[in-house]
Amino acid sequence: MVDLRSDTATKPTRGMRDAMATAEVGDDQKREDPTVIELERRVAELLGQEDAVYLPTASMANQIACLMLTKPGDELLAEENAHLLLSEQGGPAVHAGLVTRPIRSLAGRFGGDDVRALVRDRTSMHMSRTRLVSIENTHNSSGGRCWPLDEVDEVVATARELDLKVHLDGARLLNAAVATGVPAAEYGRRFDSVTLCLSKGLGCPLGALLATSSELAWHARRGKHLMGGAMRQAGIVAAAGVYALDHHVERLAEDHARARRLALALDEAGVPVELEQVETNFVQVDVGPLGMGRGEAAARMKEEGVLLSTTVWPTKLRAVTHLDIGDDDIDAAIDAIPRALGVLASA
């Protein structure tokens, strides 16, 4: 079975397992785990921030960012299909007491004018106060697309002018950095906080980091305890992150190349794919023009040995390349997907 459902499907490599097995560990709650401390140091530098906090998941990292940058009753602005709004069970409302307002967009990106148009009147005694703007890069729901740096600058500059905090959900930020050639630190240093996920393209079994200033990192560590994310000998899993930084960053370009090859072949075969959306390791397949629902399409592909997952879009499925997908897997998918969809497509 060729599993293209998500880059979270990766399993630790032999080298990563060896690094985990031999990791030097200590009590992370007491800040005595040397492997965690090393991972946090490296990620802070990688993301252009002063400090970083190791956490179990990127969703927890996003929620802690909301908690430490706002007050209950404040308002969060984010793209309408951002992970923070779509896939974290209303966490900003539950944990930080935030009002959330979505920004509608076409490609997962919005501009400074969108922010300016939505900011509440802070002199009002009745309205929530707009406090935080969040950007997601790469943007999952739009097909792993990247934010150009000039568009980031426009949003951040507007937010600063309006006295707003800015958070970067950079779960797949290293995919964006590899695809655009813009160093992750160039993106990250512009924000008050940055999330990085280790369990997607980097291939770790779990883990994420929240990078921020030294002052805010203290609050982030309080949030880590509050949300039950504080661990003991966490160096065993943090070692996977250190290994990934050494071995799995530059190879993200291989995932991108395989996604592009898959997209081009599917398009040539007549499978509806929007090639201009394929910027990193995502390929979105629109089965609507083929006259079938995505449930039926996914079932047909599974019968042919390929797994794709659904998206927020009612007729689109996604294929995501990752560490455990090689050239032979792409060849198999190129053969199987058109065959699975071809019967109804040619009817």
Image: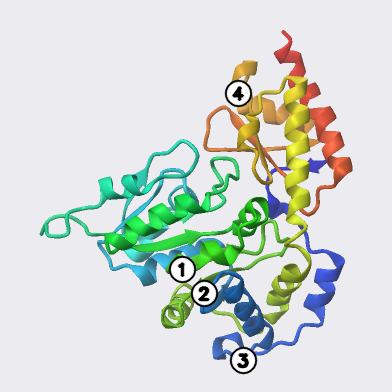
SS class, disc 1: strand
Task: State the separation of the CA atoms marked 4 and 1.
Answer: 39 Å
Whether label 2 touches label 1, CB < 8 Å: yes
Task: State the separation of the CA atoms marked 2 and 3.
Answer: 22 Å
Q: Is residue 159 left or right of residue 47?
A: left
Residue under pointer 4: 293
N-term-proximal mark, 3 vs 4:
3
The kind of residue on which mark 3 rests is Glu
SS class, disc 2: loop
Residue drawn where x is 51% and y is 79% of the image? 50
Tag of residue 321: none
N-term-proximal mark, 1 vs 3:
3
Residue drawn where x is 72% and y is 62% of the image? 249
Residue under pointer 2: 49
Residue 333 in view in this figure: yes
Task: State the separation of the CA atoms marked 3 and 4.
Answer: 53 Å
Task: State the separation of the CA atoms marked 2 and 4.
Answer: 45 Å
Closer mark to the observer between disc 4 and disc 1: 1
- Is 231 drawn above or below residue 192 in the view shown? below
For the C terminus, which image quadrant?
A: top right
Rendered location of residue 5, percent (x, y): 69, 43
Residue 88 in view in this figure: no
**Residue 174: which quarter of the image?**
bottom right
Q: Is residue 214 left or right of residue 93?
A: right
Residue under pointer 3: 32
Give the total number of marks visible in the rendering: 4
- Is 108 drawn above or below residue 210 in the view shown? above
Rendered location of residue 152, percent (x, y): 46, 54
N-term-proximal mark, 2 vs 1:
2
